[in-house]
């Protein structure tokens, strides 16, 4: 129903922006490459601004969700229901002195938050935020995301090692072991969807599912979805898998020696990664930006996408405020003895199903 | 490749050492080779301070030891002085003491449950437990005017009779609390992660527990039936029916189960004590250790002098020494008083259950992992104010 929803979709607006820029470039007589560069810069800026706002929103939201699970109100003083609280916190963190311990490896200590934040931002390049809102249409989008998010582990190790602190080192060690282990079931859980849709591009998954909720991959791939959500929660270092930064054991884990904006970058990356998990789960299992029924397409596609992603994020927050934390050995046993065999089972079942139907 | 253990200093500033406990641990990877608790960071000279206060004034010092169980500390001290002076406490005061010390048990166990669960990562429990604890601290405020440092008990009875409406408020707690315990159990008891984290962690056998001098829920979780309320009943605990919950394996999970069951039993005791609450005086009539009533002091000369002498000088117990112990929420708390016949104690010494229990930390933690150490410290249930005094 493009004509119904055209008024609210962003495609028209983007086309309009593109036309203006293209005409300016043309009248100036500049080569085509300049147009491409300008567009890329604009797209990157748009993503960064959107994600920065999203991270601030998610931090506020997490605090509100936690508070309401715990019979509290959470931030209430700054702005309506405390919505300005994270803005104020971010401003405070920006002004804080950047403390580096004397015995730290300064270069590695400096680059660790940069790597984690960059890796996180890069992953969003292939996310289809709505109809025609995919910043880059790479035809191996999901592979790209898996590859880029693996960089996180390097930065956590860097942070843990460079801080020259035993707690940080233990946190870094834990996170390396954990993320590498959970990468395996995470990747395998996605293969089911790849087999069913026959594509690796993010747009392809959405097209293959269609705007009917009973055709979404969450139903045939319910096992894959469960594995993906568990493994992704572990990748995010969130409860019940938050061992790398287990507050009660390692104080703060790998980021114990970080303060000010460097700390904020770890923190923002954590929340953006959470949104990334929600976005990928939406694309793979929940039909992406498509409405559950074609008749509901008067609500614009990016709203559907945000709604579904934020619901997944909410579920992950729900885990955090309900479950206790696993222990290191149980964590490894869970990845290799439970999730991995289940993921293989899921692949075999899907392959047989795809072959028969 | 050469390979050695690393030494990790946990605390005194650490989120999960329940105050300022410091533990020096030897780690082989993440496995604990040895754990040595180092104490003294919260030493405040409570026992020494009591030597320069009269017997009545010294009551206020006891609150500050185990600040989660102030009424129990009050009780052991006043009972020790009563034993020294051979004072008869009226039954009404005894019953109210029972009600309030059992409320204290609930208070202490709630804070234990909240912090213990938070240590293991279940953050929400803390807020749920503090929500219920609030009612108990309000109850303290209702009877004594103070939320934490109540100092409500006096030698020979109570500071004052309970205000009207006491029974209604207690009944309210009694009616709402069982459902809350169910709620906690629903979140934790059958939770797979919780069981994984606590079963078999910090195990200690009955013999080892006795050898280490453990007491309270820590000892009972190992299957030793030792509860001073049953074995040496004091303050008319023998009038009430209650069970002593016992564990089997002596691990963190059994300690958790024991304490939750103890909370239910405490409610049972409070209900019986409230139903059978006798009327009568709230403090002994013995004018040696209680001031004369206000009306008399305002009218008679002799009574006014007595009133003045009592509040300035206090009373003088006979020479001698005395030891008394009761079952505090954390185990056996004992009070040893030496009197030289003056109005101030010559020496007061406490046997704090937290101090004795934490000394077994090395035995409990050896061979476990770092995460288990945190669970074990939580399950020992220490209050550093009491360990260091």
Image (cartoon, grey):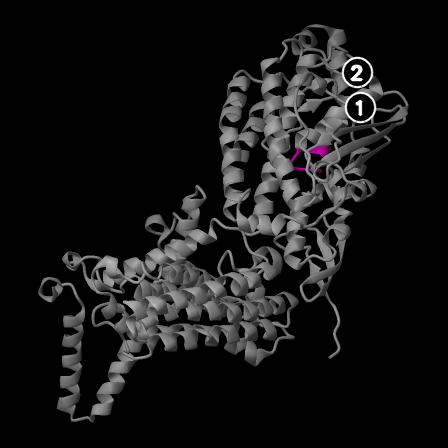
**In the rendering, at what x and y percent does residue A233 appear?**
45, 61
The answer to whether the residues at label 2 and label 1 have Cβ atoms under 8 Å apart is yes
Mark 2 lies on a secondary structure that is loop
Q: Chain of mark 2?
A: B
Image position of A192 (left or right of B28): left
**In the rendering, at what x and y percent does residue A141 appear?**
33, 76
Number of labels in the image equals 2
Of B24 and A133, the residue lying toward us: A133
The image's mark for residue B345 is: none
Q: Which residue is mark 1?
A: B81
Q: Look at the image and say whether residue B349 sits in the magenta stretch.
A: no
Tell me which corner region of the image, top left, top right, bottom left or bottom right, holds residue A12: bottom left
Q: Chain of mark 1?
A: B
Tell me which corner region of the image, top left, top right, bottom left or bottom right, holds residue A349: bottom left
Q: Which residue is mark 2?
A: B87
Residue located 48% across and 63% down the image: A339
For the magenta stretch, what is the residue range?
A: B61-69
Image position of B41 (left or right of A74): right
Residue located 60% across and 78% down the image: A105
């Amino acid at each position: 129903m493009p004509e119904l929803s055209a008024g609210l979709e962003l495609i028209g607006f983007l086309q309009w922006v593109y036309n203006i820029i293209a005409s300016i470039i043309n009248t100036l007589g500049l080569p085509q490459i300049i147009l491409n560069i300008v567009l890329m810069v604009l797209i990157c800026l748009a993503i960064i601004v959107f994600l920065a706002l999203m991270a601030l929103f998610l931090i506020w939201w997490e605090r509100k969700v936690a508070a309401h699970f715990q019979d509290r109100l959470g931030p209430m003083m700054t702005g309506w229901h405390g919505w300005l609280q994270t803005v104020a916190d971010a401003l405070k963190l920006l002004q804080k002195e950047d403390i580096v311990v004397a015995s730290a490896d300064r270069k590695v200590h400096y680059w660790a938050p940069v790597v984690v934040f960059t890796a996180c931002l890069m992953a969003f390049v292939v996310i289809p935020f709505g109809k025609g809102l995919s910043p880059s249409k790479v035809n191996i989008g999901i592979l790209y995301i898996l590859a880029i998010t693996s960089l996180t582990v390097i930065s956590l190790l860097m942070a843990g090692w460079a801080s020259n602190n035993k707690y940080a080192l233990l946190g870094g060690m834990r996170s390396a072991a954990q993320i590498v282990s959970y990468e395996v079931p995470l990747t395998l859980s996605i293969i089911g969807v790849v087999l069913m849709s026959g594509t690796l591009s993010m747009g392809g998954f959405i097209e293959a599912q269609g705007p009917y909720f009973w055709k979404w991959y969450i139903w045939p791939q319910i096992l894959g979805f469960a594995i993906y959500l568990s493994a992704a929660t572990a990748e995010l270092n969130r409860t019940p898998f938050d061992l790398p930064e287990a507050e009660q054991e390692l104080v703060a884990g790998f980021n114990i020696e970080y303060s000010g904006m460097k700390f904020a970058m770890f923190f923002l990356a954590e929340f953006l990664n959470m949104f990334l998990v929600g976005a990928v789960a939406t694309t793979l299992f929940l039909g992406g930006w498509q409405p559950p029924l074609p008749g509901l397409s008067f609500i614009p596609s990016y709203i559907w996408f945000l709604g579904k992603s934020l619901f997944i994020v909410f579920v992950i927050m729900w885990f955090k405020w309900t479950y206790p934390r696993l222990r290191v050995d149980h964590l490894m046993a869970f990845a290799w003895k439970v999730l991995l065999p289940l993921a293989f089972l899921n692949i075999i079942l899907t392959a047989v199903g795809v072959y028969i139907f | 490749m050469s390979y050695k253990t690393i030494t990790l200093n946990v605390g005194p500033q650490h989120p999960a050492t329940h105050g300022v406990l410091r533990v020096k641990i030897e780690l082989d990877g993440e496995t604990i080779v040895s754990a040595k608790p180092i104490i003294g960071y919260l030493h405040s000279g409570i026992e020494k301070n009591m030597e320069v206060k009269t017997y009545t004034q010294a009551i206020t010092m006891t609150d500050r030891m185990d600040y989660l169980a102030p009424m129990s500390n009050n009780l052991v001290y006043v009972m020790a002085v009563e034993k020294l002076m051979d004072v008869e406490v009226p039954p009404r005061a005894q019953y109210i003491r029972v009600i309030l010390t059992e409320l204290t048990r609930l208070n202490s166990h709630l804070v234990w449950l909240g912090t213990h669960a938070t240590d293991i990562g279940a953050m929400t429990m803390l807020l749920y437990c503090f929500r219920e604890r609030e009612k108990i601290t309000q109850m303290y405020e209702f009877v004594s005017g103070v939320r934490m440092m109540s100092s409500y008990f006096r030698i020979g009875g109570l500071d004052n009779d309970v205000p009207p409406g006491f029974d209604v408020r207690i009944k309210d707690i009694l009616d709402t609390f069982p459902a809350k315990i169910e709620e906690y159990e629903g979140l934790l008891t059958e939770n797979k992660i919780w069981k994984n984290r606590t079963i078999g962690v910090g195990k200690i056998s009955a013999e080892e527990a006795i050898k280490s001098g453990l007491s309270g829920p820590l000892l009972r979780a190992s299957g030793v039936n030792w509860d001073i309320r049953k074995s040496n009943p004091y303050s008319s605990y023998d009038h009430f029916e209650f069970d002593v919950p016992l564990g089997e394996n002596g691990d963190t999970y059994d300690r958790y189960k024991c304490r939750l069951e103890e909370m239910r039993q405490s409610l049972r005791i409070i209900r019986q004590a409230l139903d059978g609450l006798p009327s009568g005086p709230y403090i002994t009539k013995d004018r040696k250790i209680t001031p004369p009533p206000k009306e008399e002091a305002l009218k008679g000369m002799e009574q006014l002098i007595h009133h003045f002498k009592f509040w300035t000088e206090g009373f003088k117990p006979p020479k001698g020494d005395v030891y008394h112990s009761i079952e505090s929420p954390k185990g056996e708390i004992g009070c040893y008083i030496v009197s030289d016949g003056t109005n101030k104690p010559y020496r007061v010494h406490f046997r704090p259950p937290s101090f004795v229990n934490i000394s077994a930390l090395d035995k409990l933690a050896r061979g476990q992992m770092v995460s288990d150490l945190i669970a074990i410290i939580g399950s020992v249930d220490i209050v550093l104010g009491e360990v260091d005094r």
